[in-house]
Structures are given as C-alpha cells and as structure tokens.
Amino acid sequence: MRRKSGLVLLALAVFFAALSPLLRWYAFPRLAKVPANQYQDMVLEAKDATLLDYGTMTAKKVSKVTIVQTLKGDVEASEKIEKTAGRDVVVWDGLSYVQGPDGKMVSKIPERYIFDAHTQEPVHATGEMVDGTPVKREGIEFKWPFLVEKRDYEYFDAQARVTAPIHYKGTRDFRGVSVYYFEQTIPWTKVPFPRTMPVEGITPETVAATGTTRWYTTVRKFWVEPVTGAPVYGEEIHQEELRGGTLLGGREKVTAFAGHVKMREDYIESTVDLVKSQRVLVLLMTSYLPWGFLSLGVLLLALALYLEARGRRPADPVPAETSAPEPVTA
Amino acid sequence: MRALIAAAAGLALAFALVLTLTAVGTPTGKTSPKPMLTTVPSHP
C-alpha cells in the first residue's frame, strides 16, 4: 500500500514539476492576448490651451480642450483577417474626437489599427488607415506588449503617420504601481489636414488650394505597467500651426492648437484599478502558478522518496517460533 | 520500472492538460454594441 502511494506521489510530482515550465513558456505566450472584443474610452483634457478661431483665423486662449478617445474591437473583421494571416489578430477602430470649451467639434480623426493579439506587432491588411488614408504601421500604438522590456520601442504616430523611437527613461512609481516611463518627441512635421474640418464648407482640399499647410510637434509621455504592457497614464505636450498661404493674410504662421494634454482624473483612477486587476492575471501565469507548481512538485517528490525509503527498510527480525515438544512414546 | 511508468504518466498528463488548454484557447466574444463617442462621458 505504501509503495503504491509512493508511485502516485511520484506521478503527481512529475506532473506539477512539468506543468511549471509548460505554463510559463508554452501556455502563456499562446493564451495571453488582447481580447478581440475590447471596448475602451478615455477622456483627456488640455487646460488653458490655445485654439484657432476659424472665424477670425487668430489663435485664442481657451479654458479647456477635451479629447474623447474610443477604441472598439471589431470581432468579425479580426476573424476575417485571421483566416489569411494565420494568427490571432485584433482590429481596433479608434476615434479621437476633439471638442472645444463651447462643446463644438474641433476635429475628429478615425483610425483602424490591426495587430497581433499576442505580440502587439502590426498586421498589414486592407482597412488599416488613419483618417481614411491607408497606412502601413510599423511599431506599436496605444499598448505595449506583455512583459515590457527596459528598452526603446518603435511607436507609430497617427498624426504624422510616421514611426519613431519611444525612449525608455526609467522605472517610476505611479500611484502605488511600479511603471516604466517612456517618452517620444516628434519634431515639427508637416501633416495633412483632418478630413472633417470644424467649419462647414471648409474641406482639406479648399484649404490646400490656399497654399496653407499644417504642422505639428509633440512630446508624448507614457507610464506603462510592465507586466500587462498597458499604459496607466499618458500626457502630450502638443502644438499645431498653420503656415503660409493666403489663408493667413500675410502672416507667416498661426497656432492652431497648443496645450498640455493630460488624462482626466477619474479615468486615471479607473485605468489604474483595471491594470492592477489585469496584472494579477498575467502574474498568475508567469510567476505565481509556475513557482507554486514547481515547489509543489519538489515537495511531492521528497514525500515520494521518503515513502519509498521507508518501504525498503528491512523489517524487524521475526521471533523464532517455538513448537511444543511432541509427546514421546516408548 | 514502476517508478518510470509513474513519472511518464505524470509527464504525459501535464502535456495533455497544457495542450488542451492552449487548443481550446480563450473565447473571442462579440463586437461591443456601444458607439464611438462624440460627447464627453461624465464618468468612465
């Protein structure tokens, strides 16, 4: 019986010891992925910003500019692309809706971002676009891969439609969460006008006909939780100018927008809470369960060996049987 | 010999479990019916 228990314990010990690396290096890379049906919204604000008044074509100080950003996973589109791509794909439709202090639309830029659900590498397929213009992204956008490394990454800038390095600048503490801080600077770059302009009747084509061009620069900052790869906070020091052309009435340039864009406080809190809970799930597969299973395997192996050793110990000598003397008959 | 068989059984079971888990994968769900926002939400 003892020998049978030892064998069962040995089988369990091998089971748990083998499960540990299999879970970490086989199951985790295949199971950890961005869900295809994710829906997320975010509100960012630029207080005391500068905004162009299209009526007078002059820059004005405003109390607040609000950016509402929505990301919505298109499950049907991702399943369609997966058939040809042969891997798990996420299709995110994004909308950046910018609103002035009066509640009126300043700009709205849709985009479609297609990427590998596990690695977050871009996947190129029909429909990938920014503001209706087809693009071919390189690098990441919105989210870092799981298990972020302390290095620079390539990050896609949707305004300029270019990929540039986003630099790792150190580890910080953000509201009790250990995060990696990244920063990217996009120098002054000529960018297209948004397809939807804030004034009715004005189109990118009519503006382009005046010879006026749109320029943009930004310093993008992200505080990224390294286990999930999810940014818990973001800021942008964003500037836009219109330059040259007849639209400016002889002026060389005019500020279209300038502001320090930050996440709204309630969204910071909810993002930190969400990332904290997701972090535990990832840690379960990368750390808690693998180490737990390995320890359990070692413990069960030790117990199996102990039982085996006890089973093999020589038994106490059996006392010699004394038989009653048979009666002697003469 | 019995010990070897027990160890092999444990190993096979671990592989079977992990391979099944990864083959089943995670459900994809459906596209959210919520709209792309063009108004400022009052809370997350």
Image (cartoon, coloured by chain):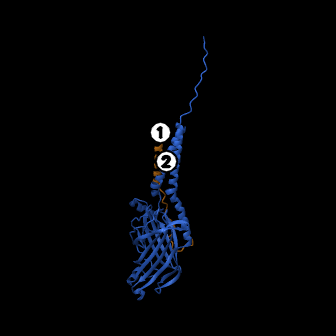
Chain colours: A blue, B orange
Q: Looking at the image, is A167 positioned above or below residue A22?
A: below
Mark 2 vs mark 1, CA separation in Å? 16 Å
Circle on res. B2: 1
Q: In the orientation shown, which residue stands out farthest toward the top?
A: A330
Which of the 4 image quarters holds residue A274? bottom right
Circle on res. A146: none
**Chain ID for label 2?**
A
Q: Write the residue at 48% across / 80% down.
A: A258
Q: Looking at the image, is A275 positioned above or below residue A220?
A: above
Quadrant into which the N terminus of chain A falls: top right
In this rendering, does residue A199 appear at all?
no
Which of the 4 image quarters holds residue A2? top right
Q: Write the residue at 40% across / 87% down.
A: A246
Percent x, y of residue A233: 51, 70
Which of the 4 image quarters holds residue A209? bottom left
Percent x, y of residue A215: 41, 79
Q: Depth check: A296 or A235 in front? A: A296
Mark 1 crowdedness (10 Å alpha carbons): few <14, some 14-19, many ≥20: few
In this rendering, does residue A312 appear at all?
yes
Q: Looking at the image, is A201 positioned above or below residue A278?
A: below
Q: Secondary structure at mark 1?
A: helix
Q: Are marks 2 and 1 on the same chain?
A: no
Percent x, y of residue A314: 53, 34
Circle on res. A15: 2
What's the residue type where badge 2 is placed? Phe
